[in-house]
Amino acid sequence: MTGLLLRGVGAGYAGKLVVRGVDGEVPDGGWLTIIGPNGAGKSTLLKAVAGLLPHVGEIRAGARPLRALPARERARLIGYAPQTPQLPDGLSVTDYVLLGRTPHLGFLAREGRRDLQLVSEALERLDLGALAARPLHALSGGERQRAVLARVLAQQPRVLLLDEPTTGLDIGHAQALLELVDRLRAEDGTTVIATVHDLTFAAQYADRLLLLNGGSVVASGTPSAVLTAPAVREHYAADAEILTTSGGELVVAPSRALNRGPSS
């Protein structure tokens, strides 16, 4: 298993840092969710960890600095599911998920029996077996999200990076997807780092939260420590109550109480 350590990490575009000075840590098999308002730098930070953007500072997987790893080894270690994946035209679900095996194949090598078996297992775990031959363009939004996750799982990464995995999903499909990721984490010991807009989902599934605003870390820790009404007001410019369900889970509930005018 592989945890991640970030020390003084900065990343951006065209030589301009969008995030800077980020410190964070997620242990083997842990779940860290990066939260923050729009434009805070969440996706930029995730892309830096994925190796899609150059970075300053240090990102380590176990004892190894990620920048020192060859591209193929890094692809075996880290699986990345973008917020808006580019799904190739003309591929079936099976063909698409097979792309996840690319880092494990030699130059000009074709997939073998073991690769096909892993793809089949990924499809079954994500309840996509019946859709294996279906064209990607014929999938619903929720099915596409699961297909993207299946491709990443077929890659067999030790670290799973998910950028807004519930985008475009209704509450039922979003909950089902996060439950699935949590179950896979428990079964495989995979380390998960995700960005999530929904603060209630962030609180209920992550072990730890990293709150970004303006490209910098403004809070980190357990969900109950990070998600407070004053923090939500300061960094999201929103009034909310932090409630606890009968099962002991946090809920971030928007509140209009402070914004209401005189009753009519």
Image (cartoon, grey):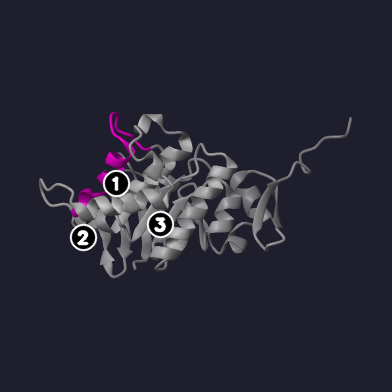
Spot the residue most to the front.
130
Q: Quadrant of the C terminus?
A: top right
Classify residue 167 as left or right of residue 232: left
Residue pictured at 71% horizontal, 56% vertical: 243
Q: Earlier in the sequence, mark 2 or mark 1?
A: 1
Quadrant of the image occupied by residue 242: bottom right
Residue type highlighted by circle 1 = Leu
Disc ID at residue 52: 1
Identify the residue under disc 3.
21
Quick check: marks 1 and 3 in contact, CB under 8 Å? no
Residue 201 image position (x, y, % from top left): 57, 51
Amino acid type at circle 3 is: Gly
Q: Position of residue 34 (x, y in %)?
A: 48, 53
* Residue range highlighted in magenta: 85-104
Q: Quadrant of the N terminus?
A: bottom left
Helix, strand, or loop for circle 3?
Answer: strand
Please report whichever mark, 2 or 3, sits nearer to the chain's N-terminal start. 3
- Front tag of 1 and 3: 1
Q: Is residue 93 magenta?
A: yes
Q: CA distance from mark 2 to mark 1?
A: 14 Å
Gap between marks 1 and 3, in whole Å? 18 Å
